[in-house]
Image (tube, rainbow, N blue to C red):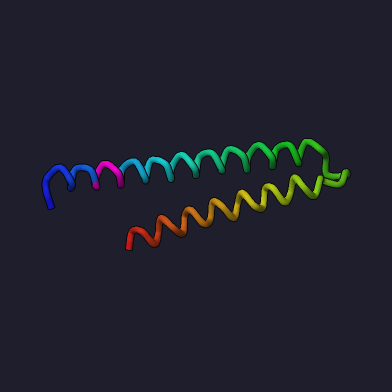
Amino acid sequence: MAKDQLIYLHTTKEQHMTNLEMAKQNISKRIDYFTKEAIKQGYGERISQNTMNYVYGLKEALEMIEWAELESDV
């Protein structure tokens, strides 16, 4: 493989990892925000099912990214 191809592959992998990190941060921020919003509704009131489904979906997405990272390290 030519040197410039190796540099491209290395750069692409670094960018890919950066995108993964950005996705993880974005999802984590959304989880925090919607969890705080749900808590603001009060413990005595029913928390919106849509809000909780959204939080659970975000948590699943974050877990999928983390598993993908672990598998790519192997």
- Which residue is pictured at 77% across the width and 47% down the height? 50
- 16 vs 66, nearest the viewer: 16
- 36 vs 1, nearest the viewer: 1
Magenta-drawn stretch contains 36: no
- Which residue is pictured at 46% across the width and 39% down the height? 22
Horizontal and vertical percent position of residue 16: 36, 45
Horizontal and vertical percent position of residue 57: 64, 52
Horizontal and vertical percent position of residue 19: 42, 41
Residue 1, above or below 45? below
Horizontal and vertical percent position of residue 8: 23, 43
Left/right of residue 26 with respect to residue 47 in the rendered view: left
Q: Which residues are magenta?
A: 9-13
Total number of numbered discs in the rendering: 0
Left/right of residue 74 with respect to residue 69 in the rendered view: left
Left/right of residue 1 with respect to residue 60 in the rendered view: left
Q: Chief secondary structure of the magenta span?
A: helix
> Which part of the image, by quadrant, shows the C terminus?
bottom left
- 49 vs 32, nearest the viewer: 49
Residue 74, above or below 7? below
- Which residue is pictured at 69% across the width and 40% down the height? 34
Left/right of residue 7 with respect to residue 61 in the rendered view: left
- Which residue is pictured at 59% across the width and 55% down the height? 60
